Amino acid sequence: MAKNKIIVVGGGLSGLMATLKICEAGGEVDLFSYCPVKRSHSLCAQGGINACMDTKGEHDSIYEHFDDTVYGGDFLADQLAVKGMVEAAPKLIKMFDRMGVPFTRTPEGVLDLRNFGGQKNKRTCFAGSTTGQQLLYALDEQVRRWEVKGGVTKYEFWEFIKIIKNKDGICRGIVAQSMNSMEIKAFPADVVILATGGPGQVFGRCTASTICNGSAVSAVYQQGAAIGNPEFIQIHPTAIPGSDKNRLMSEACRGEGGRVWVYKDGKPWYFLEEMYPAYGNLVPRDVASRAIFKVCDHMHLGINNERRVYLDLSHIPADYLERKLGGIIEIYTEFVGKDPRKVPMEIFPSVHYSMGGIYVDRKHFTTIPGLMASGECDHQYHGANRLGANSLLSAAYSGTVSGPEAMKYCKEGKQGVALTDAELEAARQEVQAEYDKIRQMNGPENAHKLHQEMGDIMYDYVSIERDNTGLDKCLVELKKILKRWDNIGLTDHGNWANQEAMFVRQLRNMILYAMAITKAARCRDESRGAHAKIVLKSDYDAMTAEQKEKLVGLAEKDIKWSADGRAHDKDDELVFFKRDDSRFMKTTVINYDPATEEPIVKYEEFEHSLIKARPRNYAVAKKE
Amino acid sequence: MAEQKKTVTFIIERQDSPTSAPYTQEFEIPYRPALNVVASLMEIQKNPVTKDGKKVAPVTWECNCLEKVCGACMMVINGKARQACCALIDELEQPIHLAPARTFPVIRDLLIDRSVMFESLKRVQAWVEVDGTWEVKDAPIQNPYTATTAYEISHCMTCGCCLEACPNVGPQSDFIGASPSVQAYLFNLHPLGKFDKEKRLNALMGKGGITGCGNSQNCVEVCPKNIKLTTYLAQLNRDVNKQALKNIFNK
């Protein structure tokens, strides 16, 4: 019997994990990637991977990991999915350990654990500050082994363009293009798994690699796959701002004792420790980012009144830092030219991770039969905010779900009829025609400049603090950018390694994904996790008395409206919408409207019966 | 001094296809603080015009992470093989010369084909033969000092600097280079990986193996991850020789 053929798109932690599981179950994988899979973005994860190993005498428990993740995600994550993940975590760590991941060890040779944000117990396994690199390499090696044994065919430097559905609407293949020869080819399969990572490049500068553009996700969104919770974009509090990218300074800095401060009245002010006495510098990322933003933009206390605060490691012994954080200290020293062992680092929040992504069920099937998604490109596990060191976990874990589920789906014969040669060829020709058209584009706009403009707009309106006027404006601007895309001109009309033509195609996908993020943010009139929305006069006036009480909690006389219509309380602090569980404890589900090219927003229920929602407050210790 | 520089000049060695002849073009971009070579190439993408005003195709190169972990953007910058993302303009003499690492086949401009390195990793079996991804039992405890060495070597990002700098890697020799060889040493250190130590050592004998190393020490000079490549190559050489003797006596 012929082996089942699964196409995996993306060779990061999730794609590789799925690949291994498929090979072990007797399947065959065609693995597609922009780059040699060893160079995938998972390797930029620094601080660690969470798993309840409980080797530090703290009576850590899997339940505690479960609760921290759900609470950290502001009760928007599917609790059964999260439960599966945290239960599997310790087993995954042992697997990685056997595969040769050089985890940092205690003097007696067992895995060391460190603190991380939003968690009170030491639960984060790590390999110095290059954990993602080490985990990715381990899976890369195992996949290479399967490549030798037979079972995996790699298509590196091939770009996924779109899926192909059979006559019944079941996904049975993809069209991809060689990034060197520019050959466009259709590939049949039984199932397609997308593991294409996050959409950071939609924001231009971010902590993500240049390959994390969300283009593949947008492509299948335009082909009918729904997107879940795209408005939840994690802003990491500590990155080195840069013009080409913002370089991440791991949360492990704070986990190992780093302190965040600015000068106030001539003295260091450790504002996180003061604002959040229970968690201090180890508050979750959304909380820390908002605090830094407030200190810089509203209190004007940033370093030299710029958007910078100090992240200080200089009080920690240098040899300890070298052992635990060597990798990122090298990054800072190399790119900034100052030594964090001696002087405090200067950092600012940056777009980092997308909690949302392709809408999937707990088995990682999308809304298109035969198409699955796993890793950062899916919407599962993190709700409204991801805890640090849960991303490597969700990436690896989701692969252990999607891979076997894909094989099970084949064994049950659910894949329907295969694509005919004519269908494969028709799909190929369609992509070829689109590509040929792009290659001839001759307008005045430069795609890279347009990308930068889009990123700036997204940062202005859809990042740490959002408001409905800004979001409306953002949608208008994005539509203009989409129109301007038609006027792009290429300087490279050739047909060999034409990176410009590929980027133009990706950019259109990115614009449409940006619209989905923005529309979802516009429609969610509450604050939850990474999505924080300022109350405007227009919002307030439209509310019933009951809503005013529930969503704002202030009487009109206690609100001061600024010139731009933003609400401030008596202490001049911005007023945000409160969390609204009655309306919005639901997954945002976005479908693409091909007629208007616009996103259609609806809300779906999800499983949240295991841990009852409670207010999220990191100023005090967690109560269960 | 840096503030006075208004522009940055690049002389870039370009090549349209694997078989076409190389040529150079000069570009001038506005200076800004903390600029690096990748960010400069991105500027050229936004305005692909040469210094003398000719509109040209943007320069082709490979990059991903921009923080010196992925290994993609290795090229020859002012004569030295290194990662372009962390090559800061302030620290480079101008005009800045960029060229592809010609130890590898050039695909286009600065874009090269390093698949040979990944093939070499297959040859030396750079992996642990785990039974599977399923749960077996606890992984063995490891000596933390050995693990520290392993961690150092495990930073190797297969960028190819050490191959580009090595006088023995190229058409004149089959030497697979420092990076893949030292990966064999890495897996020989692991408590489970060492079960296949003999296979890896045997794979490093003969054509292209460790005898190809001429001990010129160039690799350790250019390694962007500061891996003590020559130290491990020397230990590996000793291990391979021991294995060769063992092979003879066990015949």
Image: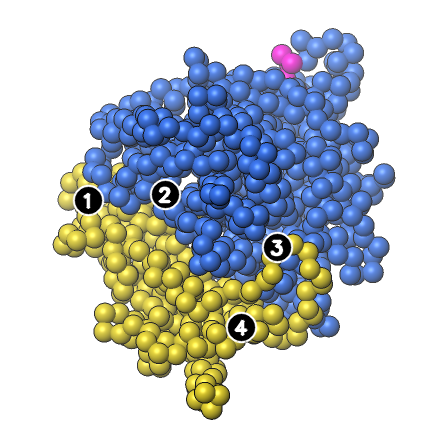
Chain colours: A blue, B yellow
Q: Nearer the viewer, mark 1 or mark 4?
A: 4
Nearest the eye: B168 or A532: B168
Q: Which numbered marker is on residue B196?
A: 4
Report the Cα–Cα distance between label 3 and label 1.
52 Å
Going 25% across and 58% down the picture, which residue do you hit? B105
Going 42% across and 74% down the picture, which residue do you hit? B203
**Do marks 3 and 1 share a subunit?**
yes
Q: Nearer the viewer, mark 2 or mark 1?
A: 2
SS type, badge 3: loop
Label 1 lies in what chain?
B
Report the Cα–Cα distance between label 1 and label 4.
54 Å
Most common secondary structure along the magenta stretch: helix
Residue B128 at what x, y percent from top left?
A: 55, 65
Amino acid of disc 3: Thr
**Do marks 2 and 4 share a subunit?**
no
Q: Is residue B244 above or below residue A198?
A: below
Q: Which numbered marker is on residue B133?
A: 3
SS type, badge 4: helix
Where does label 2 land, which residue? Answer: A158
Where does label 1 land, which residue? Answer: B50
SS type, badge 2: strand
> What segment is highlighted magenta in the picture?
A535-539
Q: Mark 4, residues whose alpha carbon is within 10 Å: few (<14), some, or many (≥20)? A: some
Report the Cα–Cα distance between label 3 and label 4.
19 Å
Amino acid of disc 1: Thr
Residue B102 at what x, y percent from top left?
A: 25, 62
- Check the picture and name the quadrant holding the C terminus of chain A: top right
Q: Nearer the viewer, mark 2 or mark 4?
A: 4
